Amino acid sequence: MSVSNDNPSSFHGAKKHGILIVDLGTQYAQLIARRVREAGAWSEIHPVQNALKAIKGMDVEGIILSGGPSSVYGEGAPQVPDEIFEMGVPVLGICYGMQWMCRALGGSVEAGHEREFGRTNLHVDDHAGLLQGVPEQSTVWMSHGDKVTSLPNGFSVMAHSADCPFGAVGDPSRRLYGVQFHPEVAHSEHGARVLRNFVLDICGLSGDWQPANIAEHLIEQIKEQVGATGEVILGLSGGVDSSVAAVLMQRAIGDRLHCIFVDNGLLRHGEREAIEIMFGKHFGMDLTTVDGEARFLEQLAGVTDPETKRKRIGHEFVEIFREEAKRFKNANFLGQGTLYPDVIESVAVHGGNTAVIKSHHNVGGLPEDLELGLVEPLRELFKDEVRAIGRYLGLDDTVLMRQPFPGPGLAVRIVGEVNFDRCEMLRKADHIVTSEIEAAGAHREMWQYFAVLLPLQSVGVMGDARTYEYTCAIRLVESSDGMTADWGYLERDLLRRISSRIVSEVRGFNRVVLDISSKPPATIEWE
């Protein structure tokens, strides 16, 4: 049968009132959508070439033009249709979206002499409308080279920074607004307030879109895709994503869901046992455990390239699912707990100009001859949205508040070649990191906290002997969605205890370092 990988950007059903987000190539299109949903409004993302068609399929109450990496003068730059500015609905342009709007309506845009990237102090000149409730001085995130140099008729300056005289602009009479900064990212202190002002006050939406609505639409979407007799094989990892996906699918199709847990040898300490108890015994799901450690390690032998690792792991997962599917004659779908951050870093999911950062095992390693259709109900959601849906479905916080763990497992936390000994080293070190942090209660403020094995050997002294061993990095991450993140810190005594235990208890490490990189420019995982 042919591959079914049709993942529309909206849930099935009647036309919805909401915000259309026009994707102009940004990595943050779905992050904008998430902020809109946080404000309690429905949102859909469409690439700019499909924008006018998308408008006909929903009752558009407002339009957001995303940022993007292009110059408005660049060859192949996304072009926003003039009709969008003539519809009479509110429009908010972000970064590139603002530049295109200003240029299209008679202003001018020029290449900046210096690229403005990072945190910038924004000074608000006009607190009405879009910037209502935003302090006179606040921190925002800038990322642009080109800049607006003159405004269209009717527009006025609403905010500025030291290097950007047109930090926010607007024409309230036409309800057209633009911001040069990125209000959707966590680094912009009051960015969520700016988007909320646009959605609720300027567009006039009621703010009644809630997780319950999302969950019920997803259940109906699964029913429609799978049909009355179809069966689904779900790759269950025990993490938040696959757990919520499993409950959604069970609600939709009942015992036609078959969960398969693959022990790939790349798991955290005690993971297999916990999953078998929780889902096999507690939830009573049809659960099959496959011991695939030898197969995965064989595929990874001698491999050092991160992309090759991910794709080989993804391919082996699919092969195992294909083999297991033979036990279920009607199993013609593969369920996955893929989230949007997995997708947006892998492919231009909405058909726009988004650059690929890295492939995800659920996205980049699927062979052309896959014999199972894909069911990915969470594909356009963020972790916090998934957790909210999980609570609505009755899942316990012991499942929902687990820290994210990548599908390729420890393979992307071992820089370089992966083998059994390195997995054991990292598994022990990671267990020390997580257990110490959780025992101290420091995990409550963290998005993720884990160990990384670096194939960097250095000289050390243990007892009276010289050592030449590997380095363990500790990665502490603070985030709300995984798309942007800051590095975290622990009390000195806790860090000292973790470091001492790793060097003392895990043979092969003689040095421990702390990763203090934010995202961007770094990613959360090392590979």
Image (cartoon, rainbow, N blue to C red):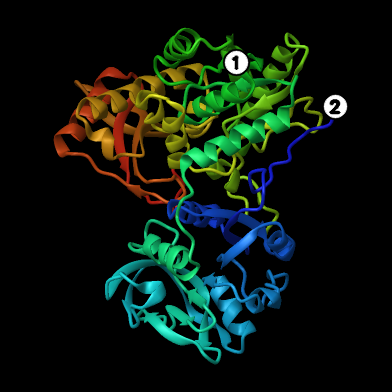
Count up the numbered dots: 2
Q: Which residue is mark 1?
A: 260
Residue 459 in picture, x, y percent from top left: 31, 32
Q: Taking the image as drawn, is residue 279 in sight?
A: yes
Give how far across and how far down residue 71 sits, in percent: 61, 74
Mark 1 burial class by Cα count in 10 Å: few <14, some 14-19, many 20+: many
- Give the distance between the C-alpha atoms of the residues marked 2 and 1, in whole angstroms: 22 Å
Residue contact between numbered discs 2 and 1, judged by CB atoms under 8 Å: no
Residue labelled with disc 2 = 1
Three-letter amino acid code at the position of disc 1: Ile
Name the mark on residue 474: none
| Amino acid beneath label 2 | Met
In depth, the one of 127 and 288 nearer the eye is 127
Q: Please give left or right for residue 230 compared with residue 170 in the image.
A: right
Number of residues whose C-alpha sits closer than 10 Å to that of mark 2, classed few (under 14), some (14–19) or many (20 or more): few
Image quarter for residue 52?
bottom right
Whether residue 527 is visible to the viewer of this picture, yes or no, is: no
Question: Is residue 134 found left or right of 85 in the rendered image?
Answer: left
Q: What residue is drawn where x is 52% and y is 22%?
A: 237
Q: Looking at this view, is 492 or 340 the one in front?
A: 340
